[in-house]
Image: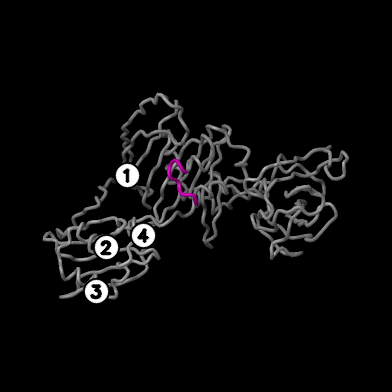
């Protein structure tokens, strides 16, 4: 029996909850069901929690009455709508306003309405038009309002509000399938994979029953979602082991992810030089070479990928060699901090900025998968060297990240306290989707 998903709707700032309601929903992944399959009723659960030191406030309804007794109404644009038909549904009874909106050049953006967009209008109790707000696709806010005996239209960049939203669920098939099932933005899912890339191989390591919880930024323009921002905090349970990550922005404006203890989550090296690649030949002391037709050691790992797939540097370093070597074909050798170096072979070509002596950063594209040198098909041969001795890059103990210094760590602990509490709330539910206003 699949566990029910719990959905929590509402909004909060780090210290203020606005509204909370919990409903039991169906499972989070889509599976085919055989004919005549009996579906069990999904339990519906109501949950009420009293949270200490939290102020409560009502959430505005779509049709809200302002303090002066006027009405704000919102309507979604439908296919085939004109500005006149939308205003009619909003109850606007004002011929002068309709004439201004239809004829004034400043209101021209309202001639091209896109389905799904929201239009908000303020009217008096008698239906008299007072003002209008409409956010265009370019993020510009068009405002029309009464000005004396006439009307005035203004256009300006719309103010952006950033809210925290959170989600959590269990994985049944893949990370992206689980994220799609709860409506998590793709940009957030990609960030999750990047944040935990040093701890989890998302191609090989995921198991059914693994779980993630995440708090992330969501941008809103005039109440409308306008795209996801950065992951603020996350935890990922893989094979019974849980890793956590918290975003820390320093005074200079740069940011990175750290554990709850203030240790940099980003390892000094990534496990794989490509995203979601497949190992075709591992590190071994004896392997039959398909070209040389002899048994010999394979002191690296081969990753299968289509020709042209980007290859990224697994750590910060300098380009020690870029060119052609017998057997390796087109190859890049990076020298990293201390005694570590990495090798990327059989490349089709190099990235434009990959030059001898150039500095590269972790994740930077340095070349592209090819079939040069002794290769029977397109793939990347990757080596991890410690003091010029090859080690298995999939099992070698990678150097840890640097911890935050003392003063910054105290600020970090204070900053992540709210995100920690929100992760705990998501974790306490079977599967959840929460919304919060910062």
On screen, residue 141 versus residue 175, left or right, reads: left
Looking at the image, is 27 positioned above or below residue 220? above
Looking at the image, is 209 positioned above or below residue 303? above
Nearer the observer, disc 4 or disc 1?
Answer: 4
Name the residue carrying label 3. 103
**Circle 2 residues within 10 Å: few <14, some 14–19, many ≥20:** some
* Callout 3 touching callout 1 (CB < 8 Å): no
Marks 3 and 4, the one that precedes in the sequence: 3
CA separation in Å, label 4 and label 1: 26 Å
Residue drawn at x 66%, y 53% is 309
Nearer the observer, disc 3 or disc 1?
Answer: 3
Q: Is residue 231 visible?
A: yes
Name the residue carrying label 4. 221
Badge 3 element? helix
- Where residue 191 appears, x then y in whole percent? 53, 50
Q: Quadrant of residue 282?
A: top right
Marks 2 and 1, the one that precedes in the sequence: 1
CA separation in Å, label 2 and label 4: 23 Å
* Callout 3 touching callout 4 (CB < 8 Å): no
Looking at the image, is 296 positioned above or below residue 229? above
On screen, residue 290 versus residue 31, left or right, reads: right
Judge by depth and name the residue closer to the eye, 435 or 304: 304
Badge 4 element? strand
* Callout 3 touching callout 2 (CB < 8 Å): no
Name the residue carrying label 2. 82
Nearer the observer, disc 3 or disc 4?
Answer: 3
Extreme residue toward the left, this view: 126
Q: Was residue 314 drawn as part of the magenta stretch in this picture?
A: no
């Amino acid at each position: 029996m699949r566990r029910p998903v719990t959905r929590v709707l509402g909004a909060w700032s780090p210290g203020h909850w606005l509204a909370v309601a919990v409903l039991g929903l169906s499972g989070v992944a889509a599976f085919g069901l055989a004919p005549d399959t009996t579906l069990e009723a999904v339990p519906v659960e109501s949950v009420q929690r009293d949270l200490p030191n939290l102020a409560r406030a009502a959430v505005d309804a779509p049709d809200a009455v302002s303090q002066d007794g006027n009405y704000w109404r919102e309507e979604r644009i439908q296919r085939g709508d004109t500005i006149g038909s939308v205003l009619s549904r909003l109850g606007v009874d004002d011929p002068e306003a309709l004439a201004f909106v239809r004829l004034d050049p400043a209101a021209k953006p309202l001639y091209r309405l896109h389905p799904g967009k929201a239009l908000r209008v303020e009217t008096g109790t008698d239906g008299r038009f007072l003002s209008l707000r409409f956010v265009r696709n370019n993020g510009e806010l068009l405002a029309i309002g009464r000005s004396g005996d006439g009307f005035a239209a203004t256009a300006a960049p719309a103010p952006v509000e950033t809210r925290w939203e959170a989600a959590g669920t269990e994985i049944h098939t893949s990370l992206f399938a689980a994220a799609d099932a709860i409506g998590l933005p793709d940009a957030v899912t990609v960030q999750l994979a990047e944040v935990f890339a040093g701890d989890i191989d998302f191609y090989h390591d995921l198991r059914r029953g693994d779980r993630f919880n995440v708090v992330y930024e969501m941008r809103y323009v005039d109440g409308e979602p306008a795209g996801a921002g950065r992951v603020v905090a996350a935890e990922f349970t893989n094979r019974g082991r849980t890793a956590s990550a918290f975003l820390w922005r320093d005074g200079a404006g740069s940011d990175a992810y750290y554990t709850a203890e203030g240790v940099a989550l980003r390892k000094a090296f990534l496990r794989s030089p490509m995203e979601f690649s497949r190992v075709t030949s591992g590190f071994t002391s004896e392997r039959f070479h398909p070209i040389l037709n002899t048994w010999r050691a394979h002191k690296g790992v081969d990753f299968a990928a289509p020709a042209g797939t980007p290859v990224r540097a697994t750590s910060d370093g300098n380009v020690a060699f870029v060119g052609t070597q017998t057997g390796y074909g087109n190859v890049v050798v990076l020298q990293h901090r201390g005694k570590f170096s990495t090798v990327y072979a059989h490349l089709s070509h190099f990235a434009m900025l990959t030059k001898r002596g150039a500095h590269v950063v972790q994740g930077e594209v340095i070349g592209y998968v090819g079939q040069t040198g002794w290769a029977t098909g397109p793939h990347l041969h990757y080596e991890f060297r410690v003091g010029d001795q090859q080690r298995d890059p999939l099992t070698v103990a990678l150097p840890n990240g640097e911890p935050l210094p003392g003063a910054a760590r105290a600020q970090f602990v204070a900053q992540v306290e709210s995100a920690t509490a929100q992760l705990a709330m998501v974790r306490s539910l079977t599967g959840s989707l929460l919304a919060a206003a910062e």
